[in-house]
Image: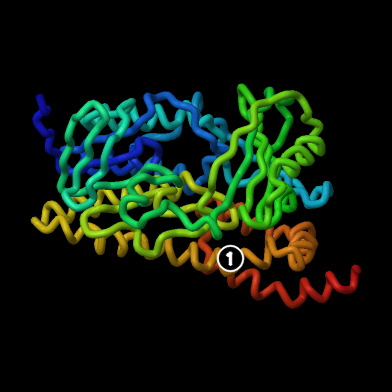
């Protein structure tokens, strides 16, 4: 016997940071909201777990309160490397936080559910109808809504339903990562700008483990497994550890993040910074923007206006990502990377700007202006030292 359909104002597929932010925002606006995910939480999620000052600000605005120190470990020291040479450690940086996504995502989901969001996690989807919109679960449950938000990650089923594929394989990034045993308490956050082509490597020391990974554009890194092995060897980490990989929408964001009454948020919309790799802050920001756009559209009696409202809200973020894509070759292109590393090693201003970008204290227009001002002199000094 068919089950009676359940109707909501907003359906959200994906209960990670962007989905939880969208659900919290929509629910606080008075909308009935269903949050759907095939996984039961807590669940494993491959991610470095770097939470920047920008992400902290988004967390405060969306969920209220400060980051729980039991879940978010503060760090104020970071070291940069290239070719095994330290480009300079930076102390007293803007505070960065490290977390395990296992813990963080479950925490955000709990906050959303406490607000009255309907819980459909641990339920697999059989069919997505982007026209209605509606979702049919594997057990036959039919959920309908006025607006559907796809917050279901880089392999988004919602994006596939809309556009035929979740991402462009020629432009996607890829990362490999391990969770190694926790290292010494003195370990700094470490970034290696040349551990991968058009990407970087990272070591994030946490309370219970150390996350080590390499990532970059997929096409120029056919040897990504060998790069991870070499990076681990350089760090003195060669013990047996399970290796996990995932695609990374490394700046290949969707200019049209949805269609009609369907919106895409977070990784599903390709919202990952192509230089820093930051995704959590953009996931939170876009999820909240999608929830707010849905609320405004429904309140106006015109749900079909959600997408243009959402696109307007994303304009500053899209503008910054476009600038970052233009700036990326100056940092990662093989011919220019040595010049960048030379400048980075000698410039406290450049290091400070990079960290202020992570902290959300400067945006890409300001960073681009700084780079353009310093590039000619830096290039001349680099040539003299060769």
Q: In the rendered view, would you say 195 is above or below 219? A: above
Neighbour class for label 1 at 10 Å: few (<14), some, many (≥20)? some
Q: Is residue 268 left or right of residue 245?
A: left
Q: What's the image's color scheme?
A: rainbow
Which residue is at the front of the view, 168 or 107? 168
Which residue is at the front of the view, 331 or 136? 136
Instruction: Report if residue 361 is visible in the image.
Output: no
Q: Position of residue 350 (x, y in %)?
A: 68, 61
The image quadrant of residue 180 is top right
Instruction: Report if residue 253 is visible in the image.
Output: yes
**At 73% across and 24% down in the image, what residue appears?**
240
**At 11% across and 34% down in the image, what residue appears?**
5
Dot 1 falls on a residue whose secondary structure is: helix
Tell me the quadrant of the picture where the C terminus can be found.
bottom right
Q: Is residue 213 left or right of residue 378?
A: left
Tell me the quadrant of the picture where the N terminus can be found.
top left
**At 35% across and 63% down in the image, what residue appears?**
256
Q: Is residue 101 left or right of residue 219?
A: left
Q: Position of residue 234 (x, y in %)?
A: 81, 38
Instruction: Please state the total of marks drawn on the protein image.
Output: 1
Residue carrying label 1? 367
Q: Position of residue 225 (x, y in %)?
A: 70, 41
Q: Position of residue 243 (x, y in %)?
A: 64, 32
Which residue is at the front of the view, 352 or 307? 307
Which residue is at the front of the view, 254 or 62? 254
């Amino acid at each position: 016997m068919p089950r009676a359909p359940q109707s909501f104002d907003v359906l959200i597929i994906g209960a990670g940071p962007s989905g939880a932010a969208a659900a919290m925002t929509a629910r606080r606006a008075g909308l009935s909201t269903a949050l759907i995910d095939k996984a039961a939480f807590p669940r494993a999620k491959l991610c470095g777990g770097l939470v920047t000052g920008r992400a902290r600000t988004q967390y405060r605005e969306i969920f209220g309160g400060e980051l729980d120190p039991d879940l978010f470990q503060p760090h104020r020291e970071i070291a940069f490397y290239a070719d095994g040479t330290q480009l300079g450690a930076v102390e007293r940086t803007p505070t960065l936080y490290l977390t395990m996504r296992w813990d963080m995502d479950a925490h955000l989901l709990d906050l959303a559910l406490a607000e009255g969001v309907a819980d459909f996690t641990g339920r697999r989807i059989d069919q997505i109808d982007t026209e209605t919109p509606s979702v049919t679960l594997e057990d036959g449950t039919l959920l309908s809504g006025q607006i559907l938000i796809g917050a279901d990650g880089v392999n988004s089923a919602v994006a596939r339903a809309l556009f035929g594929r979740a991402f462009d394989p020629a432009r996607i990034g890829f990362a490999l990562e391990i969770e190694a045993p926790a290292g010494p308490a003195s370990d700094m956050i470490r970034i290696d700008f040349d551990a991968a082509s058009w990407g970087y490597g990272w070591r994030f020391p946490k309370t219970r483990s150390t996350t080590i990974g390499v990532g970059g554009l997929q096409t120029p890194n056919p040897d990504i497994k060998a790069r991870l092995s070499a990076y681990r060897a350089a760090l003195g980490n060669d013990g047996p550890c399970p290796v996990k990989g995932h695609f990374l929408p490394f700046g290949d964001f969707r200019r049209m993040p949805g269609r009609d009454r369907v919106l895409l948020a977070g990784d599903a919309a390709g919202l990952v910074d192509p230089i820093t790799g930051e995704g959590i802050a953009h996931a939170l920001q876009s999820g909240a923007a999608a929830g707010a756009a849905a609320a405004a559209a429904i309140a106006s009696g015109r749900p079909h206006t959600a997408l243009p409202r959402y696109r307007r809200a994303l304009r500053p973020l899209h503008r910054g990502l476009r600038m970052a894509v233009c700036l990326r070759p100056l940092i990662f292109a093989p011919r220019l990377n040595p010049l960048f590393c030379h400048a980075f090693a000698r410039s406290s201003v450049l290091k400070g700007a990079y960290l202020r970008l992570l902290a959300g204290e400067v945006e890409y227009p300001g960073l681009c202006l700084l780079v353009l001002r310093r590039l000619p002199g830096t290039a001349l000094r680099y040539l003299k030292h060769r």
